[in-house]
Amino acid sequence: MTNPYTVALIVPTGIGASIGGYAGDALPLAKAIASTCDRLITHPNVLNGAQLYWNLPNAVYVEGFGLDQVAAGRWGLRPVRQNRIGIVFDQGIEPDLRVRHLQVADAARATLGLTLTDYVVSDQPLNVELRTAISGATWGTIQHPDSLLRAADQLIHHAGADAIAVVARFPDDTSSDALQDYRHGQGVDPLAGAEAVISHLIVRTFHVPCAHAPALSPLPLDPHLSPKSAAEELGYTFLPCVLVGLSRAPQFVTGNPDRHDIWANEIDAIVVPESACGGSAVISLNGSNTRIIAVRENLTKMQVPPEALGINATIVNSYLEAIGVMMCDRAGVNPSAIASTISPLAALTTEGANFKENASQALSNRIKN
């Protein structure tokens, strides 16, 4: 009996990916890949669509830093039926806007049956600041990370939270060119890089699932909005998809493995944009039995193809082609066999004394064993 066929789908955050760089626009891709594998490991950036989400029973919702630790073999993933979610609210959120988010949390309990602990308000405003790199990728900082960690610690150790949702007040900059480009499906998500900093900090410190939902004032109506960005325009909050994802996010484990745990050596394929192969997970899995599939059509602001790092990748033009490669792998079919031509076998050279000595030694070892 073969092991469950497991795929990791990564679209790095804040790098302007043409697929997956907007408000949940990679969710159709995740749905398609999930139907071709037994287990799909992916991160909030792929599955979050603000107030829109989709239940994929075989999808595993893993924050980016945690996914990197799994790929490196340091952590495993343990599936859960349901997590108790604790919410950290930034003290900098206005009272009315906080009430809107609390109503979302109550709705998730009453309508979706999620389990939430009492919430915590940070003891200082987090003061998120947004930054843009020369490449065009976005990142950010928070002025009081210690306040965020104290709030998370209280939820974990006093309220019994298994997972943490963070709602931080992000700057309103409705007139910026970057925001207008993003709303029209042409730019980089100005919030994504800072969001990653927040969730990474929680996961690295406490080893629990975490995801972030920015608190923002509603934007003015734009009749020319891109469909890729439209999910973020539906209301006051980005929180619903975060709560749904965290409700079944697997716990991180470092020892005492269970037969249901997922470890790096069980990842059969990892799918990434071709221009963004410099992430920790891809580098960790390079040289393993995991097939690295790099997709050309998903353009980003990065310029890190697999060849630049010596990564052995299967390069495909589209995600549809990537799905075909994974279906061949799952069926035990060499993808190169499904082509109009196939090269004949070539003879392996046996010249040289070293080859003869090595072959003789290998044969001797096999006989002894």
Image (cartoon, rainbow, N blue to C red):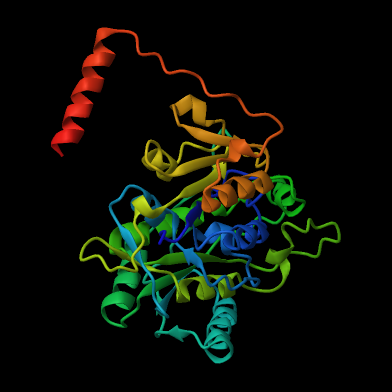
Q: Is residue 312 above or below residue 73?
A: above
- Please indicate, yes or no, whether residue 145 appears anywhere in the rendered image: no
Count of marks overlaid on the render: 0
Compared with residue 28, is residue 159 higher up or lower down, i.e. above or below? below
At x 72% / y 58%, what residue is drawn?
229
Dividing the picture into quarters, in which one does residue 249 lie? bottom left
Front-most of residues 174 and 205 = 205
Above or below 93: residue 313: above
Identify the residue shown where x is 60% and y is 25%.
343
What is the x, y in percent for residue 328?
58, 48
Q: Which quarter of the image is occupied by the N terminus?
A: bottom left
Q: Which one is nearer the viewer's eye here, 329 or 116?
A: 329
Q: Position of residue 308 (x, y in %)?
A: 49, 25
Query: Residue reaching furthest left?
Result: 368
Asked whether the viewer can see residue 119, the reply is yes
Name the residue at 37% across, 49% down: 71
Q: Quadrant of the C terminus?
A: top left
Residue 162 percent across, percent down from the top left? 35, 75
- Work out which residue is located at the far top of the displayed protein and give it: 352
The spot of residue 281 in percent (x, y) is 41, 45
Q: Is residue 360 left or right of residue 12?
A: left
Name of the residue lying farthest toward the bottom: 110
Residue 136 shown left or right of residue 269 in the figure: right
Residue situated in front as seen by the camera: 10 or 130: 10
Left or right, 323 with respect to 193, comes to: right
Q: Farthest residue toward the front?
A: 367
